[in-house]
Image (tube, grey):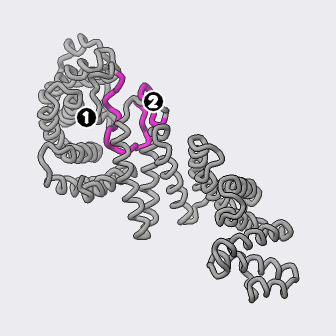
Amino acid sequence: MSEQWDNLRAKAEQAQAARDLVEAQRYWQEALREADRFSRLDRRISLTLEGLAEVYWHMGKFDEATDCCRKLKAIYSELFGPEQFDVGVICTNLAMLHHVRQQYNEAEDYYRQALAIKSKHLGKDHPDIAKLLGNYTNLLHAMNRVDEANKLKSGETIITARNWSKTKTTIELGHRNGESTGEERAFMLSDGDDDDDDGSRGKRGSGTNINREPLSLAVSRWETLRRLAEDMQQKNCLAEAEAVWAASVRYFEPFAAEDPRRMAYALDSMADSLCAVDRHEMAEAFYRKALDIKAKHLGAQHVVVARSLNNLAKLYYQLNRFNEAEPLAQQCIEIYAKLFGTDHPDYATALHNLGTLYHIQVRYADAEPLYRKALVIRQRSLGPSHPETLGLARSLANLLIATGREAEAAKVYGEKSGVITG
């Protein structure tokens, strides 16, 4: 896929998730111009038209939304046939668009098409069909066809912004026994409100595979968001990066059980982005959730779990919540000792971290042996002139000075530092 189109789509979805419809419209329009380079039946064309149509609907630009939907209906009918489920979804949207514009004859034609197609796939008793009949009943009353409305035996419903339907072109609904409502998003980011008015729709993140796109598509879309977020970080656009990471977490949550690695990566990255702008309290929940995922899928003694423990310990250190940081730092030491032995540089780093935690609390007697043990390991494994070795020597020298041992400190580091590193 075109990287430029991918980036524009991600930005449009991000703006939509943030309810910034003007920005979403701008990015979708740019994406459509980019997609015009592809063939008319290229999936990127229909994805862009769907996103743009939804934005137009929420902005009340019904003429523009209608034009997009007509193009989509032609594309899906050609690709999948006139009775495919997504053709019925687009017919539903066209019916509502004509309905709200009081173009009743056109609306009725599309309501009839949508009912015929959706009933075939979902069955006549499905909640989607009841909603469609309710809207159609409303239309018949508006046309003074009361007797026909009464024969439908359906309660009249009002069209709202939430009635907009989304397609599922990547899932063959005809073989799903009517499980899908057809109104869950297939290619749009979650807008934070995934329940139907009647509460019948399955919630995202509930562990069910109903109303979701395939994992392969979700991974592709998540990777696009990841690249965009990391690009924003490299450009020091921290607020934008945070927003994209947040979108990636919301979007990928339903797939966490199938791909815990990407879910944990998104959570850690979201926490890192919050810490980068000094919002450490908000980062805690993301780090903890990432830690839980890693421990569950990798086991408590895995090196990745140790690094996650260290992230959380560092967070508590920065928040001056030393009592909570201490057991996590101790767990890191235990894991590294078990995995790598007691002569490994990572084990020395874990010792240094716990020593720093004790040092900042003026627990010199607890910090000193950790510093000394870590320093021996670093001198042997990294060399006496390595920056990490020198940083640790400086911390130990500072501790010795604080306890009245200036001569010994000079032997360790050579000068008074006054700085704790780690």
Magenta region, mostly helix, strand or loop?
Answer: loop
Q: Is residue 249 left or right of residue 26?
A: right
Give the amino acid at mark 1: Thr
Q: Name the residue under label 1.
A: 169
Q: In this view, does 83 lie to the left or right of 412?
A: left
Percent across and percent down for residue 302 are 61, 49
Tell me the tag on residue 130: none
Nearer to the camera, 156 or 15: 15
Q: In this view, does 152 lie to the left or right of 330?
A: left
Residue 126: image quadrant is top left
Give the amino acid at mark 2: Thr
Would you say residue 232 is visible in this rendering? Answer: yes
Q: Give the range drawn in magenta.
A: 179-205
Precedes in sequence: disc 1 or disc 2: 1
Question: The C terminus is located in which quarter?
Answer: bottom right
The structure residue drawn at horizontal position 78% and vertical position 72%, both measured from the top left corner, is 372
Nearer to the camera, 419 or 192: 419
The structure residue drawn at horizontal position 17% and vertical position 22%, both measured from the top left corner, is 112
Tell me the tag on residue 208: 2
Vertical comparison of 332 with 203: above or below: below
The structure residue drawn at horizontal position 45% and vertical position 27%, both measured from the top left corner, is 199
